[in-house]
Image: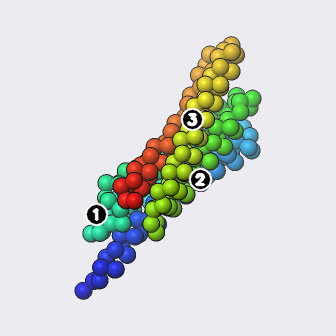
Amino acid sequence: MFSLQTIFGKGDKFYGLLEASAEAALLSARALGKMLAEGAETPALDGFRMARRREKDLFAQINLELVNTFVTALEREDIEALAGALYKIPKTVEKFAERYALFADRLADVDYSSQSAMLERACEVIVKMVGELRGGIKLDVMHGLNESMQSIESEADRLLLDLYKRLFSDAADAARLMVRRDLFELLEKAIDRCRDAGNVIYQIALKNS
């Protein structure tokens, strides 16, 4: 006969899986910063593929555990929503890395470091927010972290507009311009994915506070 503590202990496993998923997203953002800093003409993609594979495995494990676990630490739909939101972050970062690697030799003069740094900051906030779900939710702390996320996303939007101005002031090579624009937008999308994950976490916090 199982005790309630044993049953709820099994539900707690989702905290660890979600925390590992957030860490995988951060790993992908750090791999991006490293790739851009190195400035190689043929960037290595191993770090992105590892983070993406890790996220994919965790996503599958979370879904399997949801089927096999009677009691969950959070509501099932919330776990599913958060796992899905976290899954999309390294997926988008890897897509940027793959496209960047195709044209790296033509992008030596393009600086993506500001957006990359914002993405890493956003992922760090996500790691903290997911960590706050375990052991009792402090709504004031979660609210502050969510505000930080919204601030990063707003800053990224302003930066993108500034980048557009600079891009279109030098539109001599239309094909190159399109590549640069698409890459900037992919980084913006990755930051938006972090914002989406942050919104899911904050809603979970409000529901469970």
Q: Residue lying farthest bottom?
A: 1
Picture residue at 35% right of the left edge, 70% below the top: 11
Circles 3 and 2, Cβ within 8 Å, touching? The answer is no
Could you say which is closer to the camera, residue 44 or residue 192?
192
- Which quadrant, please, contains the C terminus? bottom left
Picture residue at 35% right of the left edge, 62% below the top: 74
Query: Residue 205 location in percent, x, y?
Result: 42, 56
Q: Amino acid at mark 1?
A: Val
* 119 versus 14 height, above or below: above
Picture residue at 62% right of the left edge, 22% below the top: 164
**For mark 2, what is the residue?**
124
Label 2 to label 1, Cα distance in Å? 30 Å
Q: Splitting the image into 4 quarters, where does residue 68 fall?
A: bottom left
Tell me: 84 left or right of 153: left
Visible in this render: residue 60?
Answer: no
* Label 2 crowd (10 A; few <14 / some 14-19 / many >=20): some
Per the rendering, the mark at residue 67 is 1
Tell me: 59 left or right of 89: left
* Label 1 crowd (10 A; few <14 / some 14-19 / many >=20): few
Mark 2, mark 1: which one is toward the viewer?
2
Q: Amino acid at mark 2?
A: Glu
Query: Residue 187 location in percent, x, y?
Result: 58, 37
Judged from the image, the secondary structure of the residue bearing numbered disc 3 is helix
Could you say which is closer to the camera, residue 21 or residue 95?
21
Label 1 to label 3, Cα distance in Å? 38 Å
